[in-house]
Amino acid sequence: QLQIVESGGGLVQPGGSLRLSCAASGFTLGSYAIGWFRQAPGKEREGVLCIMRSGGTTNYASSVKGRFTISRDNAENTVYLQMDSLKPEDTGVYYCAAGRLPYYSCSRYEKEYGYWGQGTQVTVSS
């Protein structure tokens, strides 16, 4: 069974950090482009960052530039989202998704990703 599971979410104070993990079972994440998406309360889901099979990354949310970093550990079959200097507006459900994209590509569009996790809640509040 192909499955993606996110973990690492929680409640954190403004200025704090979290590291989200995206782990796969039944398939190899290294063979897929991986995107991190988030959905804030009352808003549509948006693409945040993605990582190509090559390891290259793209940031689609200007609000997280310089604060969020995506990386992959193929040996652990896991992709990470390091989130620093968190702000209340970063609150939301964070989703990891895997898609069959060209080696040097990833995407901000949900339709490009065929496998999704269930999401992990991130709440930034004092």
Image: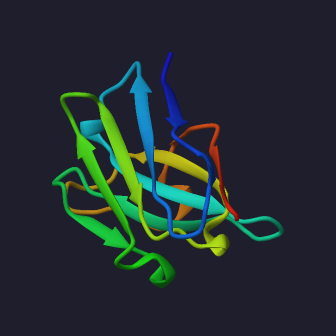
Farthest-out residue, right? 42
Can you give x and y, in whole percent of width and height, for residue 77 in the image? Answer: 29, 30
- Residue closer to the observer: 16 or 4: 16
Can you give x and y, in whole percent of width and height, for residue 61 in the image? Answer: 48, 77
- Residue closer to the observer: 33 or 84: 84
Display colour scheme: rainbow
Q: Is residue 100 left or right of residue 4?
A: left
Q: Is residue 119 left or right of residue 19?
A: right
Q: Is residue 81 left or right of residue 48?
A: left
Q: Write down the quadrant of residue 46 in the picture.
A: bottom right
84, above or below 65, in the image:
above
Farthest-out residue, bottom? 62
Q: Write down the quadrant of residue 87 in the picture.
A: bottom right
| Residue at (52, 31) in percent of width and height | 5
Can you give x and y, in whole percent of width and height, for residue 43 in the image? Answer: 77, 71
100, above or below 77, in the image:
below
Farthest-out residue, top? 1
Quarter of the image with the C terminus in it: bottom right
| Residue at (22, 39) in percent of width and height | 73
Can you give x and y, in whole percent of width and height, for residue 40 in the image? Answer: 72, 65
| Residue at (20, 54) in percent of width and height | 103
| Residue at (21, 35) in percent of width and height | 74
9, above or below 40, in the image:
above
- Residue closer to the observer: 82 or 45: 82
